[in-house]
């Protein structure tokens, strides 16, 4: 992973949107609030925040909510996926989110940011090399 470069106005808008979404996360159990934003190639931006549930397996991550919202809206190819946490260092998406990213945003750059301003970036393929995909399914 490398430090993410700033300066792209659309990316900065996505970081701001993910930070705002993080503030609205529903995380009464873990208290680990995450915000995400997906920036599509056509400039549309879709946000998500983690939503927990007392039945832990029903919890949904911010990244997946943002990706699913974009998919339902008919988003074009994804340029960036931004993940914002309130941690000392940027945090990568979980394994389940990496798998969904490999399906819905395989060519995206993932920008992992903190509310304190630290950033790192990686490609989806960097985060999940050898991902399981549709070509692995028996037809």
Image (cartoon, grey):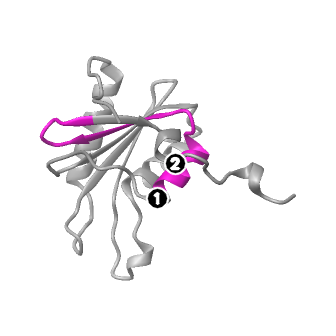
| Vertical arrangement, residue 99 with respect to residue 75, above or below | below
Q: Position of residue 72 (x, y in %)?
A: 57, 47
| Vertical arrangement, residue 3 with respect to residue 91, above or below | above
Q: Which type of secondary structure does the marked residue at label 2 adopt?
A: loop
Q: Position of residue 76 (x, y in %)?
A: 58, 31
Q: Please state if 65 lies on the left or on the right of 132 as rendered.
A: left
Q: Position of residue 7 (x, y in %)?
A: 27, 17
Q: Quadrant of the N terminus?
A: top left
Instruction: Please tell me which residue lies in front, 47 or 105.
Output: 105
* Crowd around label 1: few <14 · some 14–19 · many ≥20 (10 Å): few
Q: What residue is shown at x 45% (from left), y 30% (from top)?
A: 44
| Vertical arrangement, residue 123 with respect to residue 30, above or below | above
Residue 120 falls within the magenta-colored stretch: no
Q: Quadrant of the C terminus?
A: bottom right
Q: Between disc 1 and disc 2, whose residue precedes?
A: 1
Instruction: Please tell me which residue lies in front, 24 or 135.
Output: 135
**Residue 128 badge:** 2
Q: CA distance from mark 1 to mark 2?
A: 8 Å
Q: What residue is shown at x 40% (from left), y 70% (from top)?
A: 59
Q: Position of residue 81 (x, y in %)?
A: 41, 38
Residue 99 falls within the magenta-colored stretch: yes
Tell me how many marks there are: 2
For label 1, the residue is 95
* Crowd around label 2: few <14 · some 14–19 · many ≥20 (10 Å): some
Q: Which residues are magenta?
A: 97-119
């Amino acid at each position: 992973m490398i430090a993410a470069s700033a300066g792209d106005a659309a990316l900065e808008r996505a970081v701001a949107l993910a930070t705002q979404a993080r503030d609205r996360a529903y995380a009464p159990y873990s208290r680990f609030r995450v915000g995400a934003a997906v920036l599509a190639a056509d400039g549309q931006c879709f946000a998500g925040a983690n939503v927990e549930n007392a039945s832990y397996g029903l919890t949904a991550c911010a990244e997946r909510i943002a990706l699913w919202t974009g998919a339902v809206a008919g988003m074009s190819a994804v340029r960036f996926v931004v993940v914002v946490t309130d941690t000392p260092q940027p945090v990568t998406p979980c394994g389940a989110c990496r798998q969904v990213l490999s399906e819905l945003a395989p060519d995206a750059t993932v920008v992992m940011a903190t509310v304190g301003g630290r950033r790192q970036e990686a490609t989806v393929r960097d985060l999940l090399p050898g991902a399981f995909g549709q070509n692995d399914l028996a037809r």
